[in-house]
Image: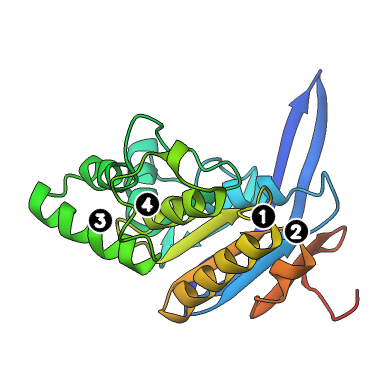
Amino acid sequence: MAIVQINNIEKKYKKRKKEMVILKDINYSFETGKLYTISGRSGSGKTTLINLLGLIIKPTKGDIIIDGKTTNYLSDSMLSKLRNKEIGFVFQSFYLNPLLTAEENILLALYINHQNKKEAKNIALKLLKLVDLENRGNHYPKELSGGEQQRVAIARALANEPKIVLADEPTGSLDPQNEENIMKLLKNISQKGKCVIVVTHSNTVKQYADIRLKINNKGLEVEQNGK
C-alpha cells in the first residue's frame, strides 16, 4: 500500500539572485512494510528530498501525498499535526536531550502529543524493550554508547506510532558493528508494517534495503546491482 507519493517534485532555491534547481522531475510511491535507501552524489539533493518527505520544507512544484492527503496547500499548523502523527525522524546526530535519561527523552516526545503520564510510561518502557535497552532507561546520553544513543533516538521516533520513519545517515557516525545493529533494527521495524526511508552513502546499509533508490539527473530511479 502506498503511504507516500511524490509527483513531479521540483525544488528551487535562490542564492545571490541566482536560481538553483536542487531537485527536478522526482516521482515515486513508497509503500508500507518496506525499507528504502536513497543515495546519490554529494549535492544531489538527498537531504532536500528527505526534508520534503518529512514536510519540513515545501516543494517549488509538484505534489506530496501522505496517507492519501495532498499536503501542498495545508497550513503550517496542519502540516505540523500531520508530521507529528505520521512521521518519525532519525538523524546522524542523535539530538537527545543530555539532561534527560533515555526513558525521559522518549517520554518528552509522548508528552508533546498530550499522552497521559501513565500510558506514556507504559509506551516508553515497551519502546525501550523493542530497541533492547530496557535495562538502560535510567541512563543519561553521556552514559550510553553511540549505538545505544541511536537506538534511543529510534525509540523516540516511534513514540507516536508513525507510519513513516525517515532516517538521514543514521549510521554515519557509528562503527561497523553498531551500523549493522541499527540496520537490523530498522529492517525489523519496516517488517512490522512501517515505511522506512534511509538516506545513506553506505554500501552496508544498502544491503538491508528492499528497494534501493538513487538520485541522478534523470530523477529518482531504482538502483541496479553494481551501479
Distance from label 2 to label 1 (Cα)?
5 Å
Q: Are marks 2 and 1 in contact (CB under 8 Å)?
A: yes
Q: Which residue is mark 3?
A: 124
Which residue in the protein does label 4 denote?
156
Tell me the quarter of the image containing the C terminus. Answer: bottom right
- Front position among marks 3 and 2: 3
Mark 4 or 1, nearer chain start: 1
* Rendering coords of residue 162 (x, y %): 37, 61
For disc 2, the marked residue is 25
Amino acid type, label 2: Asp
Give the residue displayed 71% in from the left and 58% down from the top: 200
Residue 18 at x, y percent in the picture: 84, 25
Q: How many marks?
A: 4
Residue type at the position of mark 3: Ala
Circle 4 residues within 10 Å: few <14, some 14–19, many ≥20: many
Q: Nearer the viewer, mark 4 or mark 1?
A: 4
Q: Say which of 75 and 32 sits in front.
A: 32
* Residue assigned mark 1: 9
The amino acid type, in three-letter code, at marker 1 is Ile
Query: Residue 21 or 215: which is nearer the viewer?
Result: 215
Give SS at disc 1: strand
Closer to the chain start, of discs 1 and 3, is 1
Q: Which comes sooner in the sequence, label 2 or label 1? A: 1
Q: Is residue 99 left or right of residue 55?
A: left
Q: Which mark is residue 105?
A: none
Label 1 to label 3: alpha-carbon separation: 37 Å
